[in-house]
Image (cartoon, helix red, strand yellow):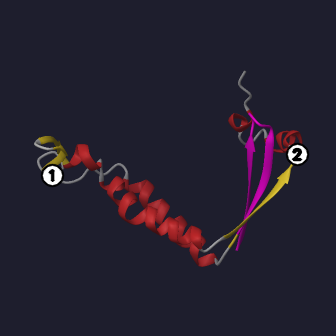
């Protein structure tokens, strides 16, 4: 499977198209895991406000957190322990090629898709 995207740097006025190639299975797997990760963000950890975690900063100095404060929600735990490792694994299976292009030409073609990408500060 192949996917095409583009990248632009409005500060240095550089741009390129990005071609990602790899087995379709890894693109689908990454997409499924990211969708699950996004949908779990609204679910809090059950009993997360009652369970305490102690973190040792220095000799004899501790900070105490609740699980909810320390980890966030179920989506955050899923992201750290499942989504991120799966995404890294899938990303390693891809071949990525950067094809440099003219910044002004890319700006003319793609500015309507993401105007913030081409916003010039100064």
Left-right relation of 122 to 49: right
* Nearer-N-terminus badge (1/2): 1
- What predominant SS class does the magenta segment belong to? strand
Q: Answer above or below: position of 76 versus 117.
A: below
Instruction: Estimate the x, y position of residue 122 in percent, counting from the top left.
Output: 72, 21
Along the line of sight, which residue is nearer the eye, 13 or 38? 13
Instruction: Estimate the x, y position of residue 63 in percent, counting from the top left.
Output: 16, 40
Q: Nearer the viewer, mark 1 or mark 2?
A: 2
Q: Is residue 17 magenta?
A: yes
**How far apart in space, not on screen, are marks 1 and 2 (Cα)?**
54 Å
Along the line of sight, which residue is nearer the eye, 95 or 111? 95
Binning the other alpha carbons within 10 Å of mark 1 as few (below 14), some (14 to 19) or many (20 upward) gives: few
Badges 1 and 2: C-beta atoms under 8 Å apart? no
Q: What element carries label 2?
A: loop
Left-right relation of 60 to 70: left
Residue at x 39% of width, y 66% of height: 82
Q: What are the residue bounds of the magenta stretch?
A: 1-20
Q: Is residue 116 magenta?
A: no
Residue at image mark 2: 102
Q: Residue 119 appears in which quarter of the rendering?
A: top right
Residue at x 51% of width, y 71% of height: 89
Q: Is mark 1 on a helix, strand or loop?
A: loop
Instruction: Estimate the x, y position of residue 84 in percent, counting from the top left.
Output: 45, 62
Residue at image mark 1: 47
Residue at x 18% of width, y 47% of height: 55
Number of numbered discs: 2
Q: Residue 106 appears in which quarter of the rendering?
A: top right
Instruction: Estimate the x, y position of residue 86 in percent, counting from the top left.
Output: 47, 69
Q: Residue 13 appears in which quarter of the rendering?
A: top right
Left-right relation of 87 to 75: right
């Amino acid at each position: 499977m192949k996917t095409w995207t583009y990248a632009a740097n409005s500060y240095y006025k550089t741009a390129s198209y990005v071609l990602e190639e790899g087995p379709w299975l890894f693109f689908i797997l990454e997409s499924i895991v990211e969708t699950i990760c996004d949908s779990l963000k609204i679910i809090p950890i059950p009993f997360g406000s009652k369970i305490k975690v102690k973190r040792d900063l220095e000799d004899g100095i501790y900070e105490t957190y609740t699980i909810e404060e320390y980890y966030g929600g179920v989506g955050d735990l899923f992201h750290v322990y499942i989504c991120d490792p799966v995404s890294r694994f899938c990303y390693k299976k891809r071949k990525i090629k950067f094809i440099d292009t003219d910044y002004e030409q890319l700006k003319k073609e793609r500015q309507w898709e993401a105007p913030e990408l081409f916003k010039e500060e100064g």
